[in-house]
Structures are given as structure tokens and as C-alpha cells.
Amino acid sequence: MEINPVYTGSSANLSENLGVSEALINKAKLGNQAAFTEIYNLYFKKIYKFIYFRVSHKEVAEDLAEDVFVKAYGKISSVNQTRSFESWLYQIARNAVIDYYRGKKQDIPLDEMENVLEYESNIVAEVELQDRQKTFLKLLKELKPDQQLVIKMKFLENLENSEIAAILHKNEGAIRVIQHRAIARLQELLKQQTNE
């Protein structure tokens, strides 16, 4: 199956935050390409962004995102519950990033690599972030790896706590605790910096 990247300008983007319905998944499970294309339109932008923040390369992120949807199309019949669909899709994306770095034979341990903000210099250069944003990215590096990851997913990727919990295989309460401690630590670091 060939899927064209049509997420830009798609009317499906208007319902991006509504998620995917059980009926739509069931149609896609039965091989309905129009239903799967609608799923693709709902999620491509989010999956692309998730991957881009981990590989820092536009073309690689596009290729990996396309691969995610090809794999998802081939395995969509294995989805049992609609509410777990999005986390299932993110898990495929996460595995694609891991496979990408394995293929590059990086010397960096994969679990550490995922928690490092490798992409700030590209974003800073491309978007010319304001001083507050640069400070935020700098202070973010001083957090524990799990705190960095939760903050990135929550505020840079705009994921819900339930989505983050599913991706990280933790419960929502644990995610809220990590997020709360990370924000408190960021506030403390910012206060220290302004007092210098």
C-alpha cells in the first residue's frame, strides 16, 4: 500500500485532537484504505514531530514516519482496544527511532540517547528562539533523564499524561509526580539563575 503524505492542509487536522474512533479502526482492520488514510491524516503530524525531536533531521523523520504507518497498516488487525491505539502507534514510532540508531551503530546507549536533547541547536538555529526559550532548554538539561523526557513529551510534543504514561509504560499518577517534580526543579533553577 502506498500512502501519500497529505497531513498538511487536510481537513482531518481539524479533528486532530479528537483521536480515532472505534468505527474507523474497525473499518481499517477490514482493509478499508479510506479509513486508514483518515487515521494517517489524524496522526501523521504528531508521529512526525515525535520522531523529528529524536533524530533532528527532517528527511529521516519523514521516512521513519512513513515507515511507521506502513507497519501500522500491516499490523492494525492486532489492535484490540481503541483507547490503546494511539499508544500502540507511538510504540511503533519509538521502535523505529531505536532501530534507526541501531542501524547507525551509535556508541551512545539507546536509553540515554532518547533522554538527551540532541535537537536544541537545530531548533535554536532554525527558529531563533527567544532568550526565555533558550534558558528553558538549557535548564532542561539539568533535570533527571526521566524528567526531561516527560517535560519534552508534555510541553514540546503536546501529549496528554495518559499518552505519556502509555508510551513510557508507567501509570498516570507516576507521570504527574515526575512532571510536578520537574517543574518544581525548573522553577528552582530559574530562581537561582535570576539571583546570580
Image (spheres, grey):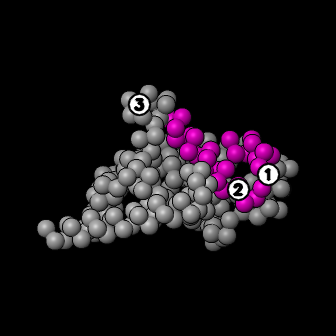
Query: Residue 125 is drawn in which quadrant?
Result: bottom left
Kindly identify the residue that appears in the image at 47 percent across and 50 percent down.
52
Observer-nearest of 22 and 4: 22
**Residue at far right of view:** 30
Kindly identify the residue that appears in the image at 48 percent across and 42 percent down.
60
Q: Nearer the viewer, mark 3 or mark 2?
A: 2
**Is 144 in the magenta?**
no
Q: Secondary structure at mark 3?
A: loop
How far is disc 1 from disc 2 in space, using C-alphas? 8 Å
Magenta part, dominant SS: helix
Residue receiving disc 3:
106
Q: Amino acid at mark 2?
A: Ser
Which numbered marker is on residue 80?
A: 1
Residue receiving disc 2:
84
Observer-nearest of 89 and 126: 89
The quadrant of the picture occupied by the C terminus is bottom left
